[in-house]
Image: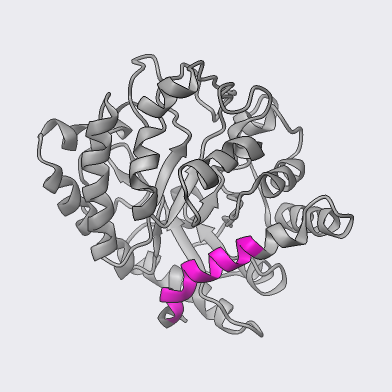
Amino acid sequence: MVHFQGESANDDARLLIQELKVGGFIYYNWSNGLTSPAQVRSLSSSLQKLAEKNENPLPLLIAVDQEGGRVVRLKEGFTILPSNLSVAESGDPSLAEKNAFTIGKELRAVGINVNLAPVVDINSNLENPVIGCRSFGATPEVAVAFAERALKGYHRAGLLTTLKHFPGHGDVKVDSHVGLPQVLKTIKELERGELYPFAKLASKTDIIMTAHLLVPALDPVQCSTLSSKTLSYLRNVIGFDEVIMTDSLVMAGVLEKCTTVEEAAIQALIAGCDILLLGGKQLIKGKRDLELAASDIQKIHGAIIHAVKVGRVPVEKLDNSVKRILLLKAPLKEEL
């Protein structure tokens, strides 16, 4: 899943869709305009029309972060809804479902089929610089009660959902956009806290997004996104067999473990991620605000192909990812 610069399909989009066969796009205000419902709808349609011309046409996943509160990409002409924390303070989980349904209907009306929401991180550390009001609250029970209803609302609207950020980004003091946070809890503490919402809601979501964290109780060495041990816990202990998506691979949290985005992409596939998120701007020192161009995606694509050919990335692992993604896309065939 990638982004490109353009308010409608252009040569970069054509390269990404028809030559590199990317599976989806993520929209940002700074790259795609998102100035009105009509503009977003036209953008989505133009991208799907390019996909329709492929030899084996598959609908694109088109995603956005539309959480409510301060993390919303679609503003002009769209309903502005309160943050998750504000919703939870109402004490009424049905409000989460109503808001999610509203968001879902508006996203579907403009051709977006994936929301990168809801956030189920536990806001247990007041020094956390990145979660805060994006969380439903400081206890896992509250997060589950409200996120479960949000999932229901999104699904009623026909939207695919994404629980994030596994294994839990709440109890940290570092933003993974700019560094690698650590969560220093025992596995029992994690299972009572950060992991609890994922365990309870895994069967109710379409996608789970990873966080770029160091969680020694799960893997003392590797960042969660690149950790086969951490993703094996998600698959085998929690029992999640749907699509795992990385958080953006241009973030400093993952690039502290890999010096290049190409290597991060390869290691994420080896670890067990299904969808690589290659959108956003790099925030690491010396490369701040540097975004990936279509030519960069082409290089990453080539690096992955080479890694498969030399046996670094097992073909069986890729086949399993493709099967999950095809099942995820199956209800979207009418979008072509």
Q: Is residue 264 above or below residue 35?
A: above
Find residue 283 and report its image quarter. Answer: top right
Left or right of 246? Residue 118 is left
Name the quarter where the N terminus is drawn: bottom right
Find residue 19 and report its image quarter. Answer: bottom right
User: What's the magenta region?
Assistant: 320-333
Q: Position of residue 228 (x, y in %)?
A: 65, 40
Q: Is residue 185 above or below residue 3?
A: above
Q: Is residue 219 above or below residue 6?
A: above
Q: Is residue 323 magenta?
A: yes
Query: Viewer-proximal residue, 200 or 17?
Result: 200
Q: Position of residue 8 (x, y in %)?
A: 50, 68
Find residue 130 and report its image quarter. Answer: top left
Left or right of 100? Residue 287 is right
- Using the rendered image of the protein, determine whether residue 174 is visible from the camera's viewpoint: yes
Residue at screen point 20% across, 58% down:
102
Residue at screen point 72% across, 43% down:
267
Residue at screen point 59% across, 68% down:
323
Query: Viewer-proximal residue, 166 or 276?
Result: 166
